[in-house]
Image (tube, rainbow, N blue to C red):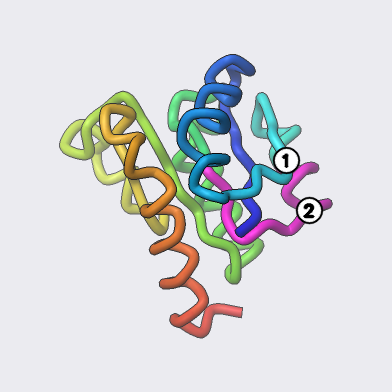
């Protein structure tokens, strides 16, 4: 499974990749530090999923995930945040899956379920 990882902090992208994603066999095919770069990387790579931090410069991560889901319906959009779902004012519902940063050990499984759900849904 190939993903693009979006977070404005390169050190966070590195930790996520080394501690959670790579050991689970998830291929981080691309990375981006801001929404504009994310759009370019996703368009070039067309990954199975895009994994986005909610706290990004405009647009916030939830809005960026929604844009990707609309433009690439066959790609899963996963959002993660330090905010719990109860404080997201429904923004987490714009993604195929949501994970709080305290539960990142579950991120590989959550990405896998989101990709499987998108594939089985018949979204092109």
Horizontal side of 13 relative to 44 (left or right) equals: left
Q: CA distance from mark 1 to mark 2?
A: 8 Å
Above/below status of 73 relative to 96: below
Look at the image and tell me in which quarter the N terminus lies. Answer: bottom right
Q: Residue at x 57, y 55 (%)?
A: 49
Residue lying furthest right: 44
Q: Residue at x 69, y 31 (%)?
A: 32
* Residue 94 percent coordinates (x, y): 40, 52
Which residue lies under the disc numbered 1?
30
Q: Residue at x 36, y 30 (%)?
A: 81
Look at the image and tell me in which quarter the C terminus lies. Answer: bottom right
Which element is circle 1 on?
strand
Circles 1 and 2, Cβ within 8 Å, touching? The answer is yes
Residue lying furthest front: 23
State which quadrant residue 2 falls in.
bottom right
Q: Which label belongs to residue 108?
A: none
Does the magenta portion include 30? no
Residue lying furthest left: 86
**Badge 1 or badge 2: first in the primary sequence:** 1
The front one of 94 and 47 is 47
* Residue 27 percent coordinates (x, y): 65, 48
* Residue 114 percent coordinates (x, y): 42, 62
The front one of 49 and 72 is 49
Does the magenta portion include 46? yes
Q: Residue at x 70, y 38 (%)?
A: 38
State which quadrant residue 86 falls in.
top left
Horizontal side of 59 relative to 107 (left or right) equals: right
Which residue lies under the disc numbered 2?
45
Which element is circle 2 on?
helix
State which quadrant residue 10 falls in.
top right
Q: Which residues are magenta?
A: 39-51
Callout 2: 10 Å neighbours few (<14), some, many (20+)?
Answer: few
């Amino acid at each position: 499974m190939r993903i693009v990882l979006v977070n404005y902090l390169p050190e966070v992208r590195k930790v996520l990749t080394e501690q959670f994603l790579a050991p689970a066999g998830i291929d981080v095919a691309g990375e981006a530090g801001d929404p504009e770069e994310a759009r370019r990387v996703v368009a070039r790579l067309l990954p199975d999923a895009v994994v986005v931090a909610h706290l990004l410069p405009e647009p916030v991560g939830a809005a960026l995930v929604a844009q990707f889901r609309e433009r690439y319906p066959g790609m899963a959009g996963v959002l993660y945040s330090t905010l719990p779902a109860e404080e997201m004012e429904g923004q987490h519902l714009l993604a195929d899956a949501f994970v709080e940063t305290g539960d990142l050990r579950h991120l590989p499984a959550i990405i896998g379920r989101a990709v499987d759900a998108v594939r089985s849904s018949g979204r092109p």
